[in-house]
Amino acid sequence: MTVAKMWGLTAVGVLYGALILLAAYGFGFTSRAAINLPIMIVLATAGVVDLHRKRIPDRLTLPGLAWALAASLFLGWPRLLDALLGVLLCGGIMLLLAVISRGSIGGGDVKLVAAIGASLGWRWGFGVVAFAQVSLALLALCLFIARRKGRKDALPFGPFLAAFAILALLAKPMQ
């Protein structure tokens, strides 16, 4: 690993850590903190791992998905229904896009979006995916214009998903 890449990963890790500390401070010692902080840690870890390894392992996404569903069960039926719809709609659409794109979107991204849908519900989950897609597309366009990346070069989607999901968890009112 080059020194520049190592510093880049460190910077991303520090940014995610700062967001999580901001969340912990803002939530205080509440049920909201107990529910959201673990999924934020999973999201941040997935973003850094995807940036470094270009893949998101199941050992991150599946426990995050399980945690989000268990927390929704704890919060009651309306929240559980929203979480299940988030998994089915957000994860299902990402799975469809992964099949259509023939591998451009990986299985880890699909499972991460399902966990995001479970954590935020389908409406906020779609918003996270939309903002992440637009941001990634703008970055890809800038890198293409600057001739830093070519048309066929892949960019990791996980860091964008993680960042916007953490911001949404900070902004979304608790149900």
Image (cartoon, rainbow, N blue to C red):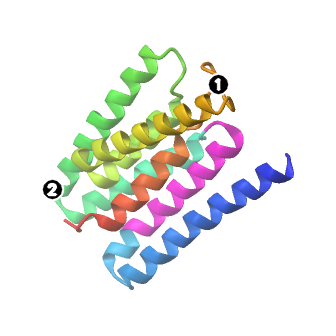
Q: Is the residue marked by circle 1 packed among few (<14), some (14-19), or many (20+) residues within 10 Å?
A: few
Q: Looking at the picture, does residue 92 appear above or below residue 78?
A: above
Q: Is residue 104 left or right of residue 36?
A: right
Is 137 in front, or is 91?
Answer: 137
Residue shown at the point (46%, 76%) measured from the top left:
22
Query: Where's residue 168, x and y in %?
Result: 34, 59
Residue shown at the point (57%, 49%) measured from the top left:
46
Residue shown at the point (50%, 54%) measured from the top left:
43
Q: Looking at the picture, does residue 120 appear above or below residue 95?
A: below
- Disc 2 versus disc 1: nearer the observer: 1
Mark 1 belongs to which amino acid? Asp
Mark 2 belongs to which amino acid? Trp
Q: Is residue 102 left or right of residue 29?
A: right
Residue 153, disc: 1
Q: Looking at the picture, does residue 57 appear above or below residue 66?
A: above
Secondary element under disc 2, as helix, strand or loop, is helix
Residue lying furthest right in this view? 2
Residue lying furthest front in this view? 146
Residue shown at the point (45%, 34%) measured from the top left:
110
Is 2 in front, or is 98?
Answer: 2
Is 58 in front, or is 146?
Answer: 146
* Magenta highlight range: 36-55
Q: Quadrant of residue 58?
A: top right
Q: Which of disc 1 and disc 2 is earlier in sequence?
A: 2
Query: Where's residue 107, x and y in %?
Result: 51, 30
Query: Where's residue 76, x and y in %?
Result: 18, 61
Q: Quadrant of residue 55?
A: top right
Secondary element under disc 1, as helix, strand or loop, is loop
The reply to whether dot 2 and dot 1 touch (C-beta < 8 Å) is no
Residue where numbered disc 2 is placed = 77
